Amino acid sequence: MSTPPLSLLQAGWLAEAIRLSEEQTPLEDSEACRLARAQGGDLTQRLLQRATHLAQRDGLLEALQHVRQGGALALLLLALLAVAGGAGLALSALGDGSRPVNLLWALGSLLGAHLLTLLLWLLAAGHTRGQLLGNLWLHLGRLLARERRSTLLLPALLSLLERARLGRWALGLLSHGLWLLMLGSALLTLLALLSTRRYGFVWETTLLPSASLAALVETLGALPALLGFAQPDAELLRASGEAVVGGEAARQTWASWLLGLLLVYGLLPRLLLLLLCFVQWRRGQARLGPDPALPGYARLRERLLPSSERLSVQHAAPERLFQSHTGQAVSSAAGSLLVAIELDPRDPWPPACPPGVRDGGVLEDSLQRRALLEQLSATPVARLLIACDPRRSPDRGTLALLAELSRYAGETRVWLLPAPSGGRLDPERLDDWHHALQQLPLPFSAEAPWDWLAGPRQAEQP
């Protein structure tokens, strides 16, 4: 079954969920690691590939789809509630027109909850607390998903977002979007009510001085006035504080003032914050991948990115591969040499060699390689057998070394070592070795050619 394409967020989400799961119980992942190595890429890409294969095998990918469907359904439900809530705010602010509208009470009904939640969001800088609508969406989505593994997936999502420093912006997108929808619904409902009903406006107080309220009304209307909304003058302020002003011009002035405040102090801040969250989210999406430095990922480094691959050349492949020079050694070459390249320290070495065959050891680093090349350049050999571990990738560094060693031998062969006891070689990687050695070209075999290495005289002895 093929793996469906996943976004970076979805792939990183699965990787984080599996990392958290493996903190409790490690998973059997030999096949997933092999597939991730075969697909190539850097360590981060291989971690994502491994997580995708494990998630598909264990049903976590299907659970992720259920959680996403639950989240979409929860978002739709919250959007409908926001539209209904906005209409309710407008109805509660204006009433049915049978009584005059108290301007301050109407303003508090329209903007009170919005300003309170906006203040909480600003005070919760860098954290997901204060994201009331965002957290409500998460819990509602978990209930609607009806997926038992959501208890693993939702913490993984929050952990991923927090580590990428995107939790505030991701939940902010949802929160500000819902508030923008609610306030937009309130604005449209206000326009509809003010267009179809006749309202009288008044502002009243018992405890506060009338002059203070008049100054507040004038101050709040200053910004909307810059956008063309009406601003009540001193005479209208005084008259509206004493009685209901019923003139058409007065009603239109107060209606325009109320609409301007809702737009400037309600919709515009939410719209600007929504754009800010969107920009920050887009800028930070590249950080949604797994962090290879985390302990759960660090232990996978050698299995997903073997040392031989990390040491390979990180440039584009040359137009022409390295060519061996077997048979071009000086005519005085004599003797046989067995040498190995980058073997697993746990593998037994050297094997039992025929008499007269010299062991050149295992080449692990550049110093050992340079020393052997200097030795062979001084005293070439007639026959050179190079043992390679086909569990590692035939990177260009190894192929270049094989070609260079062959220059100092009359004949060179490559021995592709068998798998350890109870193991098996990766057929795809073995095919890579065969293809690379055929291009050099160098003869190779899965069995040690001891008769050839021992030479004619040793091979004839009983």
Image (cartoon, rainbow, N blue to C red):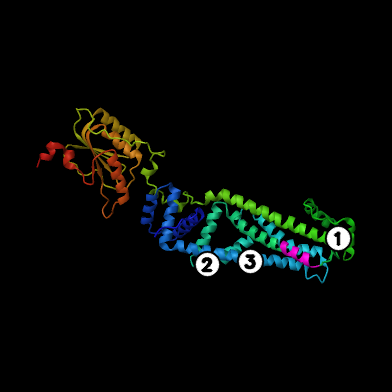
List the residue tagged with mark 2. Answer: 145
Q: Amino acid at mark 2?
A: Ala
Of helix, strand and loop, which mostly describes the magenta segment? Answer: helix
Upstream in sequence: badge 1 or badge 2: 2
Upstream in sequence: badge 3 or badge 1: 3
Quarter where residue 158 is shown: bottom right
Q: Residue 426: x percent and y percent?
A: 31, 51
List the residue tagged with mark 3. Answer: 80
Can you see residue 277? Answer: yes
Disc 2 crowd rating (10 Å Cα; few below 14, some 14-19, many 20+) is: many
List the residue tagged with mark 1. Answer: 249
Query: In the image, is 273 to the left or to the right of 220?
Result: left
Query: Does residue 85 lie above or below 268 as drawn?
Result: below
Q: CA distance from mark 2 to mark 3?
A: 19 Å
Query: In the image, is 268 to the left or to the right of 455?
Result: right
Q: Residue 335: x percent and y percent?
A: 19, 33
Asked if marks 1 and 2 touch (Cβ < 8 Å), the reply is: no
Q: Amino acid at mark 1?
A: Ala
